[in-house]
Image (spheres, helix red, strand yellow):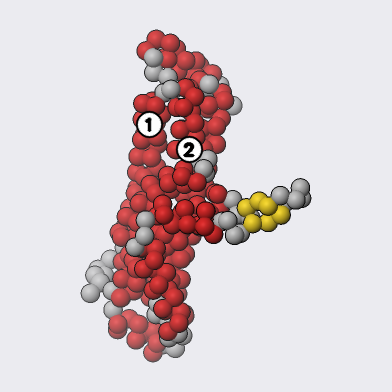
Amino acid sequence: MINLNPLWDWFRTLHETTGINLTIFYDPFDRARFFNGFLTSLRLMAICLVASVVIGVVGAWVQRSRMLVLRAITQGYVQFFRNTPPLVQLYFFYFALGSYVRITSPTGLSVPAVSNFSWAAIGLSLYAGAFNIEIFRAGIEAVPRETIEAAEALGYSRLKAYVYIILPLAFRISLPALNNNLVNLVKTTTIAYAIAVPEMLYVANQIWSDELNVPEMMNVLLVIYVSLVALLVFVMGRWERALRVPGYTPA
């Protein structure tokens, strides 16, 4: 195992000589709680990214359903989550719905059945999923009608045509817009701070309240989020180039 003590000691010396107080490196307690906050942020981002894409794929399929009720429900969901602020949605889930979703603990106390982390994951996934539905819907509409008719002529059912023919093409077309929405989702996860999810911003706030090192912690957060977004953009860009169909231009 690599011995990082010389690195931690360097940050302690940096504080003593320059006043730059990065306790998350040289103080074991602050380092541990910030690292846990970092992992919590990564978990929240990963869950929301995957769940929102799944919601988008399923919702785009439902919008093409022959069942008017399902289509109306999906459209209502999209309009609700697209036209209200994500922070208000998060408060609605945590404080309004959360006050009714409770269980009795072994000690006889009434406690929330859903944790604040779970509410954040649910709320942010639904928020981004509403935009993803519209992104995939636009991608599906860009698939040439002749391609869909060819799939039907070959005996594909509506579901199989969607899964094997329409969705792969629509996914390729939708990747640029999807990339933008997922980047926005990664940044929006910081509002989980508002319902006390112990992610990076929440933990950083605790640290700068204890250590009075606001400038240092804000710069650390800026560097980390820029790095995470840059990594996501790089991966999505490589994925977009890998999935590009040579010579195919959507109408």
Q: What residue is shown at x 47% (from left), y 22% (from top)?
A: 211
Give left or right: position of 141 versus 209. Answer: left
Across and down, in percent, residue 36 comes to 55, 36
Say if 54 sits above or below 186 in the image.
below
Residue 205 in the image: above or below residue 96: above
Looking at the image, can residue 134 be seen?
yes
The quadrant of the picture occupied by the C terminus is: bottom left
The answer to whether 16 appears left or right of 196 in the picture is: left
* Residue closer to the observer: 206 or 222: 206
Q: Residue furthest top?
A: 17
- The residue nearer to you, when weighing 140 against 181, is 181
Q: Nearer the viewer, residue 103 or 55?
A: 103
Residue occupied by mark 2: 202
- Amino acid type for the residue under numbered disc 1: Met
Place of residue 23 in the rendered image (x, y in percent of width and height, measured from the top left): 48, 22
Q: Which residue is pictured at 50% across the width and 46% down the height? A: 195
Amino acid type indicated by mark 2 = Tyr
- In the picture shown, does residue 208 fall above or below 166? above
Quarter of the picture containing the N terminus is: top right
- The mark that comes first in sequence, 1 or 2, is 2
Do the residues bearing badges 1 and 2 touch, measured as CB atoms within 8 Å? no
The residue depicted at 31 percent of the width and 66 percent of the height is 173
Q: Position of residue 14 (x, y in %)?
A: 41, 14
Residue 7's spot in the image, x, y percent? 48, 19
Q: In 3D space, how far apart are the residues under numbered discs 1 and 2 (Cα atoms)?
A: 12 Å
Disc 1 packing (10 Å; few <14; some 14–19; many ≥20): some
Is there any visible trace of residue 236 in the rendered image? no
Residue that carries the numbered disc 1 in the rendered image: 218
